[in-house]
């Protein structure tokens, strides 16, 4: 892509931490997928961490989220190739209401997903669908798929020493509330001491089991995962879920431990 308008559009997309408008799709030298060896090579090479292909992810996400596939394209910038895919939330959206997912193809063939908001797809199609639906809810979109968003089984991509998170929540008789967060957090260069470059899952739940009310009612569950690492519990509730069998998360609390947890939890 050598036109100035296309270059600006590409940098606009790469620079956004959330969903970006697809000016790239309208200004680049985009082509149909069956005309581009680069796109075909990308589709046959790229895989999510669970082995899913990009076409499987797009197909599955389009069935549960407001995610209408539009077009594939390629672009060239600073001697690097880029593959991009555009989509809209609604079939009647105009071209300036499209969104873009962009991958950078390095000179050595390495593929890097450059659109931060879409990084949950590296965990599989359910993680991307959950992230997009959560954004729909936040943006006030009508008909967001709350049933999918609140289904514990969709969070089984988060694993613990006790088992998969969704299974544990179901066995612990937990109901998922709002908000739901499935996000990728890049590290800010100007904040080296802060966490970053990780995936985060945040849930608020009600659980029909004995235990402290600040856990069983509007309890906060947070897990994080860095590249190449296992999921790690972050909130107090998440740590108990990872340490004890489902439904018995609070059976082994000593009085002093209960007091310390109550004191450490900020009021909601």
Image (cartoon, rainbow, N blue to C red):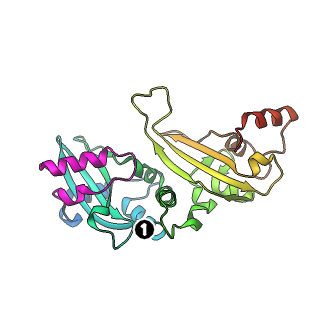
**Quadrant including the C terminus:** top right
In the image as oriented, which residue stretches furthest toward the top?
Answer: 193
- Magenta-tinted stretch: 1-30
Percent x, y of residue 52 = 43, 58
- In screen coordinates, is 181 left or right of 67? right
* Above/below status of 226 relative to 144: above
Specify whether residue 76 is in view. Answer: yes
State which quadrant residue 37 falls in.
bottom left
* Above/below status of 232 relative to 29: above
Identify the residue at horizontal 37%, vertical 59% (top origin). 54
In the image as oriented, which residue stretches furthest toward the bottom?
Answer: 92
Percent x, y of residue 219 = 70, 48
Circle 1 is placed at which residue position? 62
Specify whether residue 245 is in view. Answer: no
Disc 1 crowd rating (10 Å Cα; few below 14, some 14-19, many 20+) is some
Q: Is residue 13 magenta?
A: yes
Q: Is residue 81 magenta?
A: no
- In screen coordinates, is 227 left or right of 8? right
* Above/below status of 206 relative to 242: below
Percent x, y of residue 259 = 82, 34
Q: What secondary structure is found at the residue carrying circle 1?
A: helix
């Amino acid at each position: 892509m050598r036109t100035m308008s296309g270059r600006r559009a590409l940098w606009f997309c790469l620079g956004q931490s959330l969903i970006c408008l697809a000016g790239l799709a309208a200004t680049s030298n985009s082509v149909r997928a069956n005309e581009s060896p680069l796109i075909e090579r990308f589709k046959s090479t790229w895989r999510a961490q669970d082995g899913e292909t990009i076409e499987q992810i797009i197909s599955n996400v389009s069935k549960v989220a407001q995610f209408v596939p539009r077009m594939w394209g390629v672009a060239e910038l600073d001697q690097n190739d880029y593959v991009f895919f555009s989509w809209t939330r609604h079939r009647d959206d105009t071209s300036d209401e499209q969104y873009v997912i962009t991958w950078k193809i390095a000179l050595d063939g390495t593929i890097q997903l450059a659109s931060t908001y879409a990084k949950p797809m590296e965990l599989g199609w359910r993680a991307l669908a959950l992230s997009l639906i959560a954004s729909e809810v936040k943006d006030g979109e009508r008909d967001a798929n709350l049933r999918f968003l609140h289904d514990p089984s969709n969070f089984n991509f988060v694993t613990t020493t006790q088992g998969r998170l969704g299974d544990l929540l179901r066995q612990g008789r937990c109901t998922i509330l709002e908000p739901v967060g499935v996000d990728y957090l890049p590290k800010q260069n100007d904040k080296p001491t802060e966490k970053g470059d990780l995936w985060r899952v945040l849930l608020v739940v009600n659980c029909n089991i004995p235990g402290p009310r600040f856990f069983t009612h509007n309890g906060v569950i947070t897990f994080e995962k860095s590249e190449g690492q296992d999921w790690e519990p972050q909130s107090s509730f998440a740590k108990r879920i990872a340490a004890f069998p489902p439904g018995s998360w609070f059976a082994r609390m000593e009085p002093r431990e209960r007091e310390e947890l109550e004191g450490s939890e900020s009021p909601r």
